[in-house]
Image: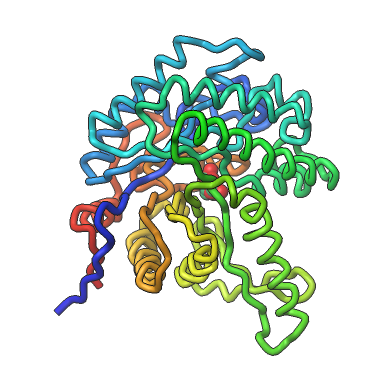
Amino acid sequence: MAKKLEFPDNFLWGASTSSYQVEGNLENTNWSDKFPAGRACDHYHRYQEDFDIADLLNLNAFRLSVEWSRIEPRPGEFKSKEIEHYRKVFEDLKEKNMKVMLTLNHFTLPKWISEKGGWSNSKIISHFSRFSKRMVGEYKDLIDFWITINEPLIFSSLGYLEKEWPPLKKDWISFLKSIRNQVKAHKEVYNILNQDYNQKVGIAKNNQCFEPFNENSIFDRFSSRVADFLWNRYFLNKINGDLDFIGLNYYFHNKIKFPWKIRNENKITTDLNWEVYPEGIYHVLKELKQYEKPVYVTENGLADSEDELRKEFIKSHLYYIHKAIKEGVNVQGYFHWSLIDNFEWDKGFKPRFGLVKVNYDTLERSIRPSAFYYSDVAKNNQLEL
Ligand code: BGC
């Protein structure tokens, strides 16, 4: 008989998106000049259709973000039309009985902030706090979970060290300032949202599974531990006192060869050549246990245009999440990245992360087979092995 793994009661089964990647027509951000997303998936106009699909797939939760540049295109000038738009978006999710997790900042910044240094300029802290305060004032009745910042270290390292993302710099000082300002901004926004408005507030943290390439090498073990501390724990340690839950975005496993070389076996890889290593999510979750907070997997997914790996990917990652839960990690939800194919930052539209395929010529949506598999898991709140 097939073995069944039950998930905890009230477990959240969701999917994630972010505004710049799906909405379309955003010309006023730090990405818009070099990496324009054009009309993207036109989710701005088609959100109801997309949420209908999420509903049909039995999802009981949804993670999305507000686009700061749309709402506050110039300092202090808040657009009521756009505030009203997002209210309708959240109301639609609520009518479908979904829990709403809202990210306040998912990589994009209004131009007026990025032109002044973005996250590397400490002025952003008060701007972000003012924006967040306005958001919580407007939407507190509709949002169940707030995420302050998505993947602070990814944004800072790709933007300020690797020259891959805006502002396309290599500048250690700006990198360090950007981390420091994100820590401060998170804390300040936490205080407003949690203390003043009694909301649940977390972060979406990209944590990775680090292992020494050679277990017997003291050097590889050293490098792996340092990487693990700096990447996985440093930021969380800084904000741990101001955090109601941890959002985990899990994508990567790195076998580290001294000093910092990554040597993975890459037995299975995605369309982006990222290694598929489901066991890694178990190790990363076990590491988060020390924080004694509820954990939501706020992102996990793969680029797989033919939908060849996605079903097994979901199944195997859920298997390891369940194992972590059995061993005492308080995981309360899983949000697959992503509901629909979307704009993958510097890589454009080629990578296909969606449970739902988007035809970018016609904007037609079609549900991939793996989505029906995920839908069954969500409906039954259990995984059949
Ligand atoms: C980001 C998403 C992105 C996904 C896949 C995460 O780092 O939060 O915006 O699309 O990974 O690369």
Determine if residue 301 is in view: no
Report whether 159 appears left or right of 290.
right
Indicate left or right for 289 with 219 as reference: left
Residue 31 in which image quadrant: top right
In this orientation, which residue lies closer to the viewer: 304 or 216?
Answer: 216
Looking at the rendered image, the quarter that the C terminus falls into is: bottom left
Identify the image quadrant of residue 309: bottom left
Which residue is the extreme one toward the left? 1
Q: Which residue lies most toward the bottom here? A: 216
Which corner quadrant holds the N terminus? bottom left
Could you say where residue 66 lies in the image, as x and y percent from the top left? 49, 28
Q: Position of residue 14 (x, y in %)?
A: 34, 47
Image point 41% across, 27% down: which residue? 140
Residue 351 drawn at (x, y percent): 50, 47
Horizontal placement of 44 versus 240: left or right?
Answer: left
Relative to 46, residue 221 above or below: below
